[in-house]
Image (tube, rainbow, N blue to C red):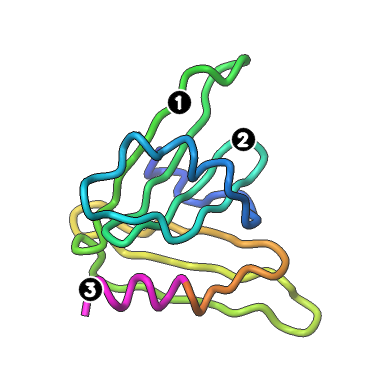
Amino acid sequence: MIDFQNKSFLKMKQDSSFSKKVHELIAQGEEILDSYKSMRDGVVFTTMRIIVINVQGLTGKKVDYTSIPYKRINVYSIETAGTFDMDAELDIFISGIGKLRFEFRGRSDIREISRYISQAII
């Protein structure tokens, strides 16, 4: 499970490798929209939820998958990349849990991620 006391994820970049890792967790009718990776951990956005992947241990064979259904998100905020600051951020507020922050590097399309969430919660 995500450590909700340390609720920020290292800067991630777009990477399809985690899409393959969560394929067996995807429900019927659910589709993978995008995936991102930091050093070892990752996040996958689907049509129904956000799946946070936390790779543990020295060998990385132990993996924790935390599923956050979009319907549990109360409020979210995005910060787009600027001219000099190329990083973008997504803050989500989950009822009963609190705030979770994702930081994206480089050319990540944070507006597209915002559309995923908006379509699911509005």
Circle 3: is it few (<14), some (14-19), or many (20+) Cα within 10 Å? Answer: some
Q: Residue at x 68, y 62 (%)?
A: 105
Q: Which SS does the magenta portion mostly show? A: helix
Q: Residue at x 51, y 58 (%)?
A: 102
The type of residue carrying mark 2 is Arg
Q: Is residue 81 magenta?
A: no
The type of residue carrying mark 1 is Val
- Extreme residue toward the right, this view: 84
Region rendered in magenta: 113-122
Secondary structure beneath dot 1 equals strand
Hey, which quadrant is residue 120 in on the image? Answer: bottom left
Q: Position of residue 106 (x, y in %)?
A: 72, 66
Judge from the rendering whether residue 30 lies leftward or rightward of residue 65; answer left or right.
Answer: left
User: Which of the two labelled residues, at mark 3 and mark 2, occupies the earlier sequence position?
Assistant: 2
Q: Position of residue 122 (x, y in %)?
A: 21, 80
Judging by the rendered image, the residue that carries numbered circle 3 is: 121
Residue 40: image tag: 2
Judge from the rendering whether residue 45 lies leftward or rightward of residue 28; answer left or right.
Answer: right
User: Is residue 113 positioned above or below 80 on the image?
Assistant: above
Judging by the rendered image, the residue that carries numbered circle 1 is: 63
Query: Along the line of sight, which residue is nearer the eye, 64 or 14?
Result: 14
- Quarter holding the N terminus? top left
Q: Residue at x 40, y 43 (%)?
A: 5
Q: Residue at x 36, y 54 (%)?
A: 50
